[in-house]
Amino acid sequence: MTFKDKEQHLDFLKNSITYLQNLGYKNIKADMEGFETPKSYFKKGSNVSITPDIVAEKEGRKHIFDISLKTPRTNLLKSKWLFLDAFSILKSHSFKLITTRGHYKFTNEMLNDINLTDKKLIKL
């Protein structure tokens, strides 16, 4: 990621958190200054770690959110989404993707590639 990409990601992360707070989500954890960092999950036998972008609670249920912005590192993103989807099903959590205008097509193509077409996108 370039510095500009990280800045765009942080701005969108802030907007996403504000949106979720307005919808009534509580106990929000995000990989951003001012918030508690969500739990990371490590792949055995390697140094790969997966950290959701946002974890929040609403009505007693945990919700995992990941931000979808265009990136050249599509394989890592696909692996992350597959893991978070399987993990959320296993733990009875909810997993959703947050995206914005200009990134819908990219996100939908990625979801089609990994057969997660049942995911509803949160479009900001």
Image (tube, rainbow, N blue to C red):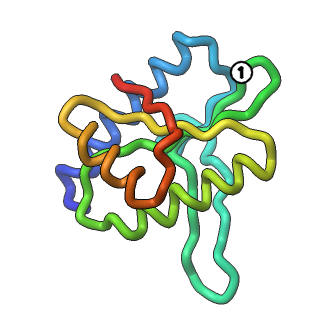
Quadrant location of residue 93? top right
Q: Is residue 37 above or below residue 35?
A: below
Quick one: quadrant of the N terminus?
Answer: bottom left
Residue at 46% x, 18% y is 19
Q: Identify the element where label 1 is drawn.
A: strand
The image shows residue 123 at horizontal and vertical percentages of 36, 25
Indicate whether 1 appears above or below 39.
below
Is residue 97 rendered to the left or right of residue 75? right
Front residue (pair 12, 94): 94
The residue tagged 1 is 58
Q: Residue at x 51, y 55 (%)?
A: 81
Q: Which of the 4 image quadrants contains residue 122?
A: top left
Q: Residue at x 18, y 36 (%)?
A: 102
Tell how many labels: 1
Image location of residue 77, percent across then percent down: 42, 61
Residue depicted at x 22% and y 51%: 5
- Residue 21 is left or right of residue 10, and the answer is right
